[in-house]
Amino acid sequence: MRKKSKYKPRGVLLNTMGYVMEGMTPVSQHTSFAIDVKIKTHMALMNMTQGKAGRGDIDTLIQAVNVVEALYRMGVGAEYGDAVRDGSNALHSVGVRGAKSGQFVLKSEEMKALNTIMELHDAQLEVITLKDMERAYKIVVEEFRQRKMRPIVTKEMV
C-alpha cells in the first residue's frame, strides 16, 4: 500500500489584479456585506438587551467581538484597549451565566460594555479594507485552532 503524500497544491487565482483591487477597497464600499453584518450583530445585541437571546445570538456576538479583538491587535482602534477588554469580559460572563441557566441576561455594566464594543465594531468596519478583514479572520481561525481563546465553560461541562 502506497503512503499518501502530504502535498496539496494551492488554488490558482484567475484574476489576480481583481483580487488585489478588491482587497484594497474599504469594507464600507461593499454596502450589502457591511449592512448584513451590522444588522446581524445589532439584532443579536437587541435580543440580548431584551432578554430574548438564544445561542445563535450569543454566537453572533462572540464572532463580532473576536473580529474586534483581532482588528485591535492589528492596530485598528488601538486607543480603545479598555473598551475591547471590558466588552470581551462582559460577553464572557454573560456566556458563562447563560450556559448555566439557559438564559442570556445582561447586567447594566455588561450592557454598556457591549454597546461600546459594538460601536467600535461598526467604526472598524467603516475604515478597514477587505484585506484587513481577511487578516483578522485568519487571526481568529488560527487562535481557535491553537485553542488560545477563552472558552465559555461551566462546572457542569467539565
Image: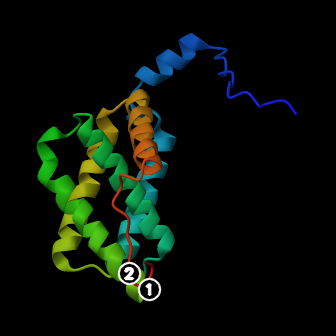
Kind of residue at disc 2: Gly
Q: Which mark is residue 102?
A: 1
> x and y percent of residue 24 in the render?
41, 21
Q: How many marks?
A: 2
Q: Nearer the viewer, residue 114 or 97?
A: 97
User: Residue 135's quadrant in the figure?
Assistant: top left
In the image, residue 25 sits, relative to residue 110, either above or below, namely above
**Callout 1: helix, strand or loop?**
loop
- Please, which residue is most extreme toward the bottom here? 101
In the image, residue 105 sits, relative to residue 65, either above or below, namely below
> x and y percent of residue 54 in the render?
47, 77
Q: Is residue 112 left or right of residue 103?
A: left
Q: Are marks 1 and 2 in contact (CB under 8 Å)?
A: yes
Give me the residue at 73% from left, 27% from top. 5
Dot 2 alpha-carbon crowd within 10 angstroms: few under 14, some 14 to 19, many 20 or more:
many
**Callout 2: helix, strand or loop?**
helix
- The answer, for residue 44, to whether it is visible in the render is yes
Give me the residue at 24% from left, 56% from top. 117
Residue on which disc 2 sits: 98
Q: Nearer the viewer, residue 128 or 85?
A: 85
Report the Cα–Cα distance between label 1 and label 2: 5 Å
- The answer, for residue 104, to whether it is visible in the render is no
> x and y percent of residue 67 in the render?
36, 47
Dot 1 alpha-carbon crowd within 10 angstroms: few under 14, some 14 to 19, many 20 or more:
few
> x and y percent of residue 59 in the render?
45, 64
Give me the residue at 25% from left, 53% from top. 119
- Please, which residue is most extreme toward the top here? 17
In the image, residue 100 sits, relative to residue 151, either above or below, namely below
- Please, which residue is most extreme toward the front here? 1
Kind of residue at disc 1: Gly
